[in-house]
Amino acid sequence: MAFKFTPRKKFCRFCADKNLPLNYKKPDILDDFITERGKIIARRITGTCAKHQRKLTTEIKRSRQMALLYYTAVHSTDVKKKTV
Ligand SMILES: [Zn+2]
């Protein structure tokens, strides 16, 4: 499995960079915290702190509703067959 995140030094990206926006309007940033299959990456892997992880999940879910992020891997027919 190839994660976009290489577990090196763990730190919360949102704490480290106060200017890093954390909201559903920035799917390109949220994208870093989900796998290519659309799953939210666990906190222990990304190193995001509890406070921000909570916010992150909320924003990812919101973003999904706005159709800015995908729920699963690019709505392929293969995936649909399994989930629907
Ligand atoms: Zn944080």
Image (cartoon, grey):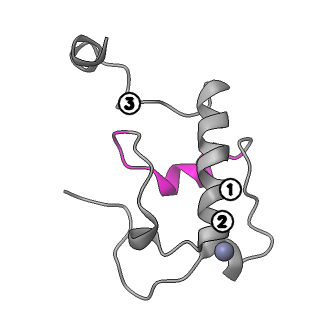
Task: Give the residue type that dot 3 points to.
Answer: Thr
* Residue 5 coordinates in the image, percent (x, y): 38, 68
Q: Which residue is mark 1?
A: 55
How many angstroms separate mark 2 from mark 3 (CA)? 23 Å
Q: Quadrant of residue 38?
A: top left
Q: Quadrant of ligand 1?
A: bottom right
Q: Residue at x 34, y 39 (%)?
A: 37
Q: Residue at x 37, y 49 (%)?
A: 35
| Disc nearer the start of the sequence (2/3) | 2
Q: Which residue is mark 3?
A: 72
Q: Depth check: 84 or 74 in front?
A: 84
Question: Taking 75 as reference, is 55 left or right?
Answer: right
Query: Are the two marked residues, 1 and 2, in contact with CB atoms closer than 8 angstroms?
Result: yes
Element marked by disc 3: loop
Element marked by disc 2: helix
* In the depicted structure, whether residue 58 falls above or below residue 64: below
Task: Give the residue type that dot 1 points to.
Answer: Lys
On residue 52, which mark appears? Answer: 2
Q: Dot 3: few (<14), some (14–19), or many (≥20) neighbours within 10 Å?
A: some
Q: Depth check: 79 or 43 in front?
A: 43
| Disc nearer the start of the sequence (1/3) | 1
* In the depicted structure, whether residue 6 falls above or below residue 66: below
How many angstroms separate mark 1 from mark 3 (CA)? 20 Å
* Residue 73 coordinates in the image, percent (x, y): 34, 31
Quadrant housing the N terminus? bottom left
* Residue 40 coordinates in the image, percent (x, y): 45, 49
Q: Residue at x 68, y 71 (%)?
A: 14
